[in-house]
Image (tube, grey):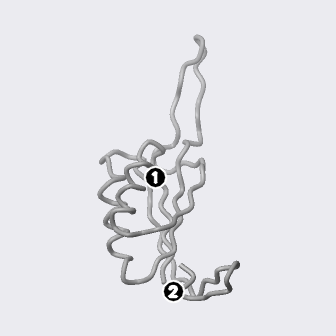
Amino acid sequence: MKKIEAIIRPFKLDEVKEALIEEGIRGLTISEVRGYGRQKGHTETYRGSEYRIEFVPKIKIEIVIEDSKFEAAINAILKTAKTGQVGDGKIFIYDVKDVIRIRTEESGKDAL
């Protein structure tokens, strides 16, 4: 099993979610996060005053999937989240040793 963490632009969330559903990925967790990388924030003007936004709002998607669906999930995220501009985000991939569903105590692939 693999865990995918994808940091994406907020307005891309619906597109990514729909693409994952089309690939048969049933569950995901999202979090609103803030950060910066090469984008390094930006400057905005509000009521005539200029101020700096250092941490850019992003969405973090977390998915744990079986190995057979891994490539399809990565390709769906890449296809839908990419704009070609700095700040599109990153995908992190981890190996998952085990997963247990609390309600039924199922483990492994059955718990997904």
Percent x, y for residue 91? 44, 64
Judging by the rendered image, the residue that carries numbered circle 1 is: 8
Percent x, y for residue 15? 37, 50
Percent x, y for residue 94? 51, 77
Residue nearest the observer in this picture, 59 or 92: 59
Crowdedness of circle 1 by 10 Å Cα count: few (<14), some, many (20+)? many
Residue name at image x 54 percent, y 56 percent: 60
Residue name at image x 32 percent, y 71 percent: 72
Percent x, y for residue 61? 51, 59
Crowdedness of circle 2 by 10 Å Cα count: few (<14), some, many (20+)? few
- Asked if residue 54 lies left or right of residue 16, the reply is right
In the rendered image, the vertical position of residue 109 relative to residue 92, given as above or below: below
Residue nearest the observer in this picture, 3 or 25: 25
Residue name at image x 31 percent, y 46 percent: 83
Amino acid type of the residue that numbered disc 1 sits on in the rendered structure: Ile
Query: Based on the displayed image, in which of its 4 quarters is residue 111 positioned?
Result: bottom right
User: Which label was assigned to residue 109?
Assistant: 2
Residue name at image x 33 percent, y 52 percent: 82
Cα gap from disc 1 to disc 2, whole angstroms = 27 Å
